[in-house]
Image (cartoon, helix red, strand yellow):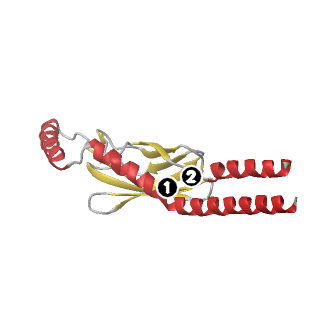
């Protein structure tokens, strides 16, 4: 009976430790952020340790931007930019392998709007503000897109977790039935 009790406790604990995917907790720059100066690095922070990581940056025209170094550091993925980024919109595609071996990926979009000449900058700012107000999705929509991407990644593993949990419970039920029949 003690073995059965220990086995059932093990079954309850096991599913809790299986789902340890790394989730993105923050980034620098943040999603949709408009920067006054070109960043020196792109940094992603995760809620658990990562093993590997990669990232690519492309500009508005689809050209890839060179990174001098991309390195996973404990719970961060950091990419060092080789050169300053000119004004424009940039998309960063990233992926990491979490400690449990599962891949987690995402996309980050940000803008660089550095001032060049005061008159041009004031004019561009006014135009950019009007354009952004007309075309930019609301912050709530961007947040919901990020949450939807995280839910989609979690949904990929949910069917397997369900199958494993059902199999373990079936084995436990058969074990209990067999032990009861032997008495």
Decide which of tag 1 and tag 2 comes sooner along the chain: 2
- Measured as percent of width and height from the top left, residue 71 is found at 54, 51
Observer-nearest of 128 and 84: 128
* In front of the other: 127 or 142: 142
- Return the mark for residue 21: 2
In front: mark 1 or mark 2?
Answer: 1
How many numbered circles are shown?
2
Left or right: 21, with 85 as reference point: right
Query: Mark 2 and mark 1 in contact (Cβ < 8 Å)?
Result: yes
Foreground of the two, 4 or 106: 4
Residue at (44%, 57%) from the top-left corner?
Answer: 152
Left or right relative to 14: residue 91:
left
Taking the image as shown, residue 119 lies to the left or right of residue 30, namely left
Quadrant of the rendered image containing residue 103: bottom right
Q: What residue lies at 46% left-to-right and 45% top-to-bottom?
A: 43
Residue drawn at point x = 47 percent, y = 50 percent: 79
Q: Residues within 10 Å of mark 1 (few under 14, many from 20)?
A: some
| Residue position marked by numbered label 1 in the rendering | 154
Is any atom of residue 54 visible in this view? no
Left or right of 175, for residue 36: left
- Residue appearing at x 58%, y 45% in the figure: 48
Task: List x then y, in percent, for residue 155.
Answer: 48, 58
Badge 2 local density, few (<14 within 10 Å), some, or many (20+)?
many
Q: CA distance from mark 1 to mark 2?
A: 8 Å
Residue 179's label in the rendered image is none
Name the image quarter holding residue 162.
bottom right
């Amino acid at each position: 009976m003690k073995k059965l009790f220990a086995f059932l406790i093990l079954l309850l604990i096991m599913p809790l430790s299986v789902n340890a995917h790394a989730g993105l907790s923050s980034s620098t720059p943040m999603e949709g952020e408009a920067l006054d100066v070109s960043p020196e690095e792109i940094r992603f922070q995760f809620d658990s340790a990562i093993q590997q990581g990669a990232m690519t940056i492309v500009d508005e025209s689809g050209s890839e931007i060179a990174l001098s170094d991309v390195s996973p550091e404990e719970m961060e993925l950091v990419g060092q930019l080789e050169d300053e980024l000119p004004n424009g919109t940039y998309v960063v595609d990233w992926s990491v392998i979490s400690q449990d071996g599962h891949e987690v990926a995402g996309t980050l979009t940000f803008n660089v709007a550095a001032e060049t000449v005061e008159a041009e900058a004031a004019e561009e700012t006014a135009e950019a503000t009007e354009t952004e107000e007309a075309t930019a999705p609301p912050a709530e929509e961007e947040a919901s897109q990020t949450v939807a991407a995280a839910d989609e990644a979690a949904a990929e593993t949910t069917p397997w977790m369900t199958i494993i949990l059902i199999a373990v419970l079936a084995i436990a039920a058969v074990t209990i039935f067999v032990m009861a029949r032997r008495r």
